[in-house]
Image (tube, rainbow, N blue to C red):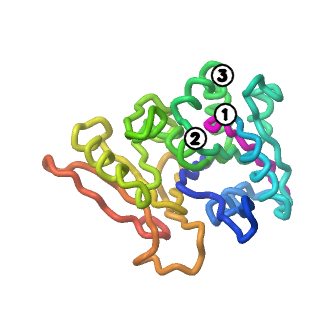
Amino acid sequence: MKRYIMATSGGFLPTDRWTSVVPGETVLRMLKLTGKTRPRICFIHTASGDDQAYLTRSYAAMTDLGCDVTHLQLFTQPNAPIKDQILKSDVIWVGGGSVANLLAVWRLHGVDIALKEAYDQGTILGGVSAGSICWHLGGPTDSFGPKLEPITNSLGFLPYGNGVHYDSEAQRRPMVHDLVKRGVFEQIYATDDRVGMLYENEVPIEVITDRTGLDPATSPAAYLVTKTAGDVVESRLAPGLIS
């Protein structure tokens, strides 16, 4: 069975209507990967404290896509049986916010265990920012304050570090390089804003941008950061299949 994770710094695009968003190519690809005419997508917005405005925007964005939309809410108490809600979903999308809080609450409620079972059964996982870092070993986060700090106890479904918002927040790239240099992570995959990395069976296979029609040579991209002979090496991964 093929297992997929879409780890992004995007997912949804703003429109000319205030607070309105539409799915980008990363989310659309996840739906396509299900192979179903009416896939069931579940939003999990634990990282934002189950922010209701965020959830409302997420539901509205899926209106015209022919999906069955559900959500798993944990504040102030679960809105549905956790394992059942997760396992009956074809796609899980995890929103942004505090990855540290997300991990703590998930482990308290057993969400992490249910997600692993779903992943092993073929449910497609994905998310943005905190919803990207959570699937990896960890990465830089602003969960603890304005200054970035590393988190190293993420779920580890993907055996790499993860960097998000790589092109839009000045602290991100230096910290990614420092974490690799110090050996906190052997390698880190990072994404610019509006970019996602698609993993198949824990191997990165494609870089996908939410905006179509951009030149892959100059568009936002993904990156692999490793250490060779003591030096940190950053390799740009242009949108498209990874060779």
Q: Is residue 209 left or right of residue 16?
A: left
**Amino acid type for the residue under numbered disc 3:** Gly
Which residues are the magenta region?
Answer: 38-48
Q: Position of residue 200 (x, y in %)?
A: 54, 52
Q: Is residue 129 left or right of residue 87?
A: left
Q: Residues within 10 Å of mark 2 (few under 14, many from 20)?
A: many
- First in sequence: mark 1 vs mark 2: 1
Determine whether the residue tagged by mark 2 lies in a helix, strand or loop: loop
- First in sequence: mark 3 vs mark 2: 2
**Amino acid type for the residue under numbered disc 1:** Gly
At 33% from the left edge and 47% from the top edge, which residue is drawn?
176
In the rendered image, residue 45 lying in the magenta stretch gets the answer: yes
Whether the residues at callouts 1 and 2 have beta carbons within 8 Å, the answer is: yes
Instruction: From the image, tell me which residue sits under label 3.
Output: 110
Select label 1 or label 3 by which is in front.
Answer: 1
Q: CA distance from mark 1 to mark 3?
A: 17 Å
At 59% from the left edge and 44% from the top edge, which residue is drawn?
96
Instruction: From the image, tell me which residue sits under label 1.
Output: 49
- First in sequence: mark 1 vs mark 3: 1
Determine whether the residue tagged by mark 1 lies in a helix, strand or loop: loop
Instruction: From the image, tell me which residue sits under label 2.
Output: 97
Q: Quadrant of residue 150?
A: top left
Q: Residues within 10 Å of mark 3 (few under 14, many from 20)?
A: few
